[in-house]
Every structure is written in C-alpha cells, then in structure tokens.
Image (cartoon, helix red, strand yellow):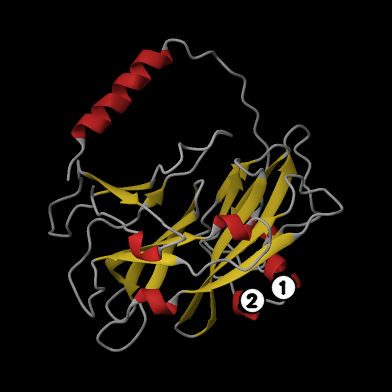
C-alpha cells in the first residue's frame, strides 16, 4: 500500500519547521579505524547511538564508546562484539558475524547491543546485552545478556536449510524491544523470500531476569519453502528517541520502502509499507502483526 499522504505531510512539516532551525556548529572526531579491528572488511555495518554521557559505535564485529565532551575513547581499544556475552558464558553468542546494532534505551537510560550469532553452521541466535547503567566508564558497569534461538522462527527452504537472518534491526518501545530481519535463501543466491519480526520481553531484560519467550510473526505466513523475490523487505522498527514513553497501549510501528522488482528496467519505487505490531505478554494469543496496516 502506498502512503503518499504520509510522505507529503513529512515534507510539509519539514518546510514549515526548517525556517526556525538555528545554525549549529558541528564537531567531528575519529571513530573506529580499520586497523583497530581484527577482521577488516568492506561491509562494516557502521552505526551508533548517543547516550547521556557517551556515544557508542559499532563497526563490523567490534564496538567502542567515546566521551560526548572530550571525544576520548572509553576503552583503550575497541571491544570485541562477543565481549559482553563471553563474560556471561553464553556460548551461543561466541561467534558474532556482523550486523550488530547499538541502541540507547532513553526510557530506561540503558545501553543495548543486539547482534546475530552463528555458533554452528546453519544455527542462529540473536544476542542482546543491556547495561545496568548509562555510564560506560562506571566501575560497576555490568551487562545483562540474553541469547534467543532463531531457527524455530526462520523457516527452511526446499533443501531443509534454514533461511539466513539478514539485516537485523533493533528498536526500543515501551512494551518490548523489537527486532526485524530479512529471510535469505542461501541455496538460491541469498534471495530474500520474506521477513520475521520479534518482540523481546524488555521489562524482564532490564532487570536481568529470565524473559518471556519472544513473540514472532512472519510475512509471508507461513514462511514458504521457496518463493519469488519478496519486495517489502528491510523493515525498520520505530525507536523512542525521547524520555516520554508512548501512550499506554500504543502499538509498535515498522516501516519499509517497497523495493522495485528485478525485471530489468524498474529501478525506483514510490511505495512504503507500514506494519502495526501489538504484543500481549499476558496472553500471547492476542498478539498480532497486521501487515501493511
């Protein structure tokens, strides 16, 4: 479904507010360099988040944080992406393979790291580490860590091979952490055949206790054993940027741009897709993910 009105409203809002934007002086600083990470690759998936005291960056399979005022690095060298999980003896999170995400949960003032792990061939986990403080220089810094098995929700192709969970993205909402990922067929040139979106039990994860099982939905549903190129992939979950929680009961939203078909001539798309995820931790049967709401 095409939401042209939503696009037009966003453009109008930008035009109306830009006249009041004040000129600002921006400062830049050096982040993680290629020579600082053990495996140098072109596809480094850089991203980061700004917290109350630091900025934290993820690059490939390592992360580093920097003071917001002095830009001094928090640790002498970038930390391996496996570090929080190694300290917790989570063996299934000992082999992160890129696509890590750094998020700052502003509602709880905590750092969140999410990353895919493949401890064995065709075996996948989503690993999450949550700090117990907003200050990464604190002597009491500790990470609550979790490993969520993904194979039960990924589906398999006609060869019985699990689909590869590609491009996972993480968002903070009041009722859950939401993770979206593409489903790629490794036996068919990593063709994207669908998506999976999961809600993680944020309430228990923030205090380091055992979370409820994650709740996941797919599109298509059921996940096919083979299929055409899925054009609604690469979902982005909404993420709370302020310190005020959404109104009680407000559902999580996810959005993607409708990709053009690979037909030899289509190169652009004007369509957007919107998902509306309702999670009910008391009665999971009430949870739902209406597609393109």
Q: CA distance from mark 2 to mark 1?
A: 7 Å
Q: Identify the residue at the far top of this view.
A: 19
Residue farthest along the bottom direction in this orientation = 159
Task: Please state the horizontal and vertical placement of residue 265, each as a whole percent of the image.
Answer: 12, 53
Dot 2 or dot 1, earlier in sequence? 1
Residue 190, quarter of the rendered image: bottom left
Report the residue marked by disc 2: 94
Q: Between 281 and 16, which is closer to the camera in this rendering?
A: 281
Which corner quadrant of the image does residue 162 belong to?
bottom left
Specify the label residue 138 is tagged with.
Answer: none
Residue at left 38%, top 46%?
A: 251
Mark 1 Cα-neighbour bin, 10 Å: few <14, some 14–19, many ≥20: some
Q: Position of residue 151 (x, y in %)?
A: 43, 79
Left or right, 143 with respect to 128, comes to right
Image x and y of residue 108, in percent: 64, 44
- Seen at 46% across and 61% down, the residue is 282
Neighbor class of circle 2 (other Cα within 10 Å; few <14, some 14-19, many 20+) is some
For residue 191, above or below residue 178: below
Q: Secondary structure at mark 1?
A: helix
Which residue in the structure is indicated by mark 1? 86
SS of the residue at dot 2? loop
Q: In front: 54, or 29?
A: 54
Q: Would residue 280 be found to the left or right of residue 223 on screen?
A: right
In the depicted view, which residue is nearer to us: 122 or 215?
215
Q: Residue at x 28, y 25 (%)?
A: 9
Disc 2 + disc 1, Cβ < 8 Å:
yes
At x 72% / y 45%, what residue is drawn? 134
């Amino acid at each position: 479904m095409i939401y042209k009105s939503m696009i037009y409203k966003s453009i109008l809002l930008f035009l109306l507010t830009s006249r009041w934007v004040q000129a600002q002086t921006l400062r830049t600083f050096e982040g993680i360099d290629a020579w600082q990470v053990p495996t140098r690759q072109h596809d480094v998936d850089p991203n980061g988040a700004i917290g109350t005291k630091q900025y934290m960056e993820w690059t490939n399979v390592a992360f580093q944080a920097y003071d917001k005022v002095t830009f001094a690095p928090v640790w002498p060298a970038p930390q391996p992406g496996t570090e929080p999980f190694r300290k917790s003896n989570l063996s299934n999170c000992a082999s992160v393979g890129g696509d890590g995400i750094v998020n700052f949960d502003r509602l709880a003032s905590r750092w969140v790291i999410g990353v895919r792990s493949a401890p064995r061939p065709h075996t996948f986990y989503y690993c999450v580490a949550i700090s117990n403080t907003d200050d990464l220089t604190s002597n009491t810094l500790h990470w609550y860590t979790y490993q969520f098995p993904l194979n039960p929700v990924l589906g398999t192709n006609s060869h019985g091979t699990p689909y590869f969970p590609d491009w996972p993205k993480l968002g903070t909402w009041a009722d859950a952490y939401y993770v979206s990922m593409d489903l790629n067929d490794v036996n068919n040139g990593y063709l994207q055949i669908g998506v999976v979106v999961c809600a993680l039990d944020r309430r228990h994860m923030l205090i380091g206790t055992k979370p409820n099982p994650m709740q996941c939905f797919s599109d298509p549903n059921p996940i096919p054993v083979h299929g055409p190129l899925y054009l609604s992939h690469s979902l982005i979950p909404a993420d709370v940027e302020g310190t005020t929680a959404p109104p009680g009961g407000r559902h999580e939203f996810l959005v993607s741009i409708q990709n053009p078909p690979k037909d030899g001539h289509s190169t652009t798309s004007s369509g957007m897709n919107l998902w509306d995820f309702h999670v009910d931790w008391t009665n999971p049967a009430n949870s739902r993910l209406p597609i393109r709401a």
